[in-house]
Image (cartoon, rainbow, N blue to C red):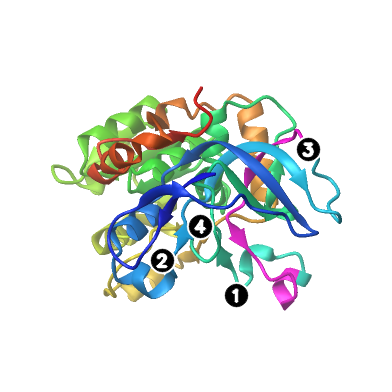
């Protein structure tokens, strides 16, 4: 089969032939239809410090995907040949305290599909059946391909109640924009999203945010004035990983406000812990998706009319992977989709 592979330690990827995967007793094999390009894939392509320390070539990349089950292991139940599935990219141990308690998203031994094991940038992928989310309702294939990052957005957006609340999201990348769409759909009063990219702020406006704020020309305090707010934001979602973003968020939170932090900073930085204490703020780290409550919420949100189509801006054949990765890296895009079945 054809697969997009990190063949050697160094920059670049190779589209090459690799053996078809075979399922273990508890695995399924999926014929891949669509995949999404993630920031993790860009790191591995560039072979930065994180990738060099984490990935062992040769490795098939990719963890955002949708496809059709074509083979199941002897011990598999609940997933059948012909099912349309998306994949949960976090592979958990199943034996630690959190896994046994049903808190699989907190497994300290989590491994990544397409990072520690061969992934979905291929015509076929094998994964544990428990990581296959079967779509029981009609779903657009491009949207189904990005259920993994959509799950990050839903996990973050629903970490705290948002009905009637004023919500601040820092970072208008695809996940931040999806989180904004979820917050509006779930009943937030005002949703403000910040960034410095005009392109991504425009995408955020397409999903219905109340204010898409360019923080290179205006402040979050200005946004409060424009929206008639007087006491600060009730819920914050930090998606950018930028130190100034979290610092500004803390400064603009209401007393008793709650912050869900998904953005991963690349450096250590100071935080006004006095503001955290005096305002009695809650800060929650978010990583991945709750397995599988978040996945259930995702499916229900789509069934009830949540529209993610503005987030998907580019589509390429897998044979055009160089162009697709260049587009994703440039940043003037939402989610970039690779088509693996030629349709």
Asked if the stretch drawn in magenta spans residue 88, the answer is yes
What residue is disc 2 on? 279
Q: Secondary structure at mark 2?
A: loop
Q: Residues in magenta?
A: 81-99
What residue is disc 3 on? 81
Query: Are the two marked residues, 1 and 3, in contact with CB atoms closer than 8 angstroms?
Result: no
**Quarter of the image holding residue 313?**
top left
The mark nearer the N terminus, 4 or 2, is: 4
What residue is disc 4 on? 114
Which of pointers 3 and 2 indicates the residue nearer the eye?
3
Residue name at image x 73 percent, y 77 percent: 97
Residue name at image x 27 percent, y 40 percent: 223
Query: Are the two marked residues, 3 and 2, in contact with CB atoms closer than 8 angstroms?
Result: no
Which of pointers 1 and 4 indicates the residue nearer the eye?
4
The mark nearer the N terminus, 1 or 2, is: 1
Q: Position of residue 106 (x, y in %)?
A: 62, 68
Res. 108 mark: 1
The mark nearer the N terminus, 4 or 3, is: 3
């Amino acid at each position: 089969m054809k697969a997009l592979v990190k063949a050697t330690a160094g920059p670049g990827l190779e589209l090459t032939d690799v053996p078809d995967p075979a399922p273990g007793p508890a695995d399924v094999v999926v014929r891949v239809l669509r995949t999404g390009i993630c920031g993790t894939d860009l790191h591995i392509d560039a072979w930065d410090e994180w990738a060099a320390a984490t990935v062992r070539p040769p490795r098939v990349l990719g963890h955002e995907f949708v496809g059709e089950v074509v083979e199941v292991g002897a011990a598999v139940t609940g997933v059948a040949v012909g099912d349309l599935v998306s994949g949960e990219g976090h592979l958990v141990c199943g034996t630690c305290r959190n896994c046994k308690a049903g808190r699989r998203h907190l497994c300290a031994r989590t491994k990544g599909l397409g990072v520690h094991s061969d992934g979905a940038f291929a015509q076929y992928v094998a994964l544990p059946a428990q990581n296959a989310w079967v779509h029981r309702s009609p779903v657009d294939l491009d949207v189904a391909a990005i259920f993994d990052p959509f799950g990050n957005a839903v996990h973050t957006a629903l970490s705290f109640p948002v009905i009637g609340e004023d919500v601040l999201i820092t970072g208008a990348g695809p996940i931040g924009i999806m989180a904004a769409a979820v917050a509006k759909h779930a009943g937030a009063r005002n949703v403000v999203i910040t960034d410095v990219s005009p392109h991504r702020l425009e995408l955020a406006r397409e999903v219905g945010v109340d204010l898409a704020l360019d923080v290179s020309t205006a402040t979050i305090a200005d946004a409060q004035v424009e929206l008639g707010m007087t006491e600060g934001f009730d819920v914050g979602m930090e998606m950018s990983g930028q130190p100034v973003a979290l610092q500004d968020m803390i400064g603009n939170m209401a007393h008793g406000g709650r912050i869900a932090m998904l953005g991963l900073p690349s450096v250590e930085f100071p935080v006004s812990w006095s503001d955290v204490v005096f305002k009695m703020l809650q800060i929650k780290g978010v990583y991945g998706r709750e397995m599988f409550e978040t996945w259930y919420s995702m499916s229900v949100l789509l069934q009830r009319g949540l529209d993610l189509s503005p987030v998907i801006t580019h589509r390429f054949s897998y044979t055009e992977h160089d162009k697709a990765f260049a587009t994703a890296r440039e940043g003037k895009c939402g989610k970039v989709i690779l088509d693996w079945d030629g349709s």
